Image (cartoon, rainbow, N blue to C red):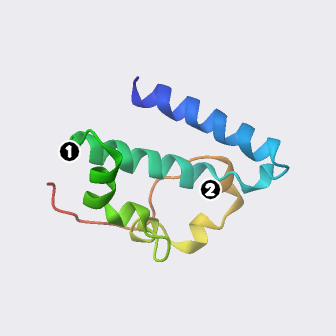
Amino acid sequence: MSLIDALVRFTESLKRFANHNGHPELYHETITWAYLLLIHERMERSPINDFATFEAANADLFAWKPSILNRYYDQETLDSPLAKRTFLMPTKQTYETLR
């Protein structure tokens, strides 16, 4: 499955899940897409075949506070109505060394 297909399927499923549970306002497009893009990048950089190994190698993706998104986004941006309804590019400059 391509990244674009995964983004579409996961986004649609997450929106359905939020609606089904009576909380459509909890869906956040920027957070959803940013995590999916980060996960995809990590999977491409270091292919791992099982979830436990992936989780151990990418603990920063699973930390709640601080979230990995704090490295890429200002909180004001993530809190904005625009970020909730459409994907916004990161607002912080990061200079990470490619693995």
Q: Tell me which residue sits at (28%, 42%) in the image.
A: 43
Q: Nearer the viewer, residue 89 or 47?
A: 47
Q: Amino acid at mark 1?
A: Arg
Numbered disc 1: secondary structure? helix
Q: Nearer the viewer, residue 84 or 45?
A: 45
Q: Quadrant of residue 58?
A: bottom left
Which label was assigned to residue 45?
Answer: 1
Please tell me how crowded label 1 is: few (under 14), some (14-19), or many (20+) other residues with Cα within 10 Å: few
Point out residue 41 in the picture as x, y percentages from the top left corner: 30, 45
Q: Quadrant of residue 12?
A: top right
Secondary structure under tag 2 reads helix
Quadrant location of the N terminus in the rendered image:
top left
Judging by the rendered image, the residue that carries numbered circle 2 is 83
Which residue sits at x=16%, y=55%?
98
- Residue at x-position 50% and y-position 72%: 74
Image side of residue 65 versus residue 51, left or right: right
Of labels 1 and 2, the one closer to you: 1
Q: Is residue 96 above or below residue 37?
A: below
Q: Residue furthest bottom?
A: 65
Residue 72, percent from left and from top? 41, 65
Amino acid on which disc 2 is placed: Ala
User: Label 2 near label 1: C-beta < 8 Å?
Assistant: no
Residue 37 point in image, percent of width and height:
41, 45
- Give the Cα separation between the discs numbered 1 and 2: 27 Å
Q: Earlier in the sequence, mark 1 or mark 2?
A: 1
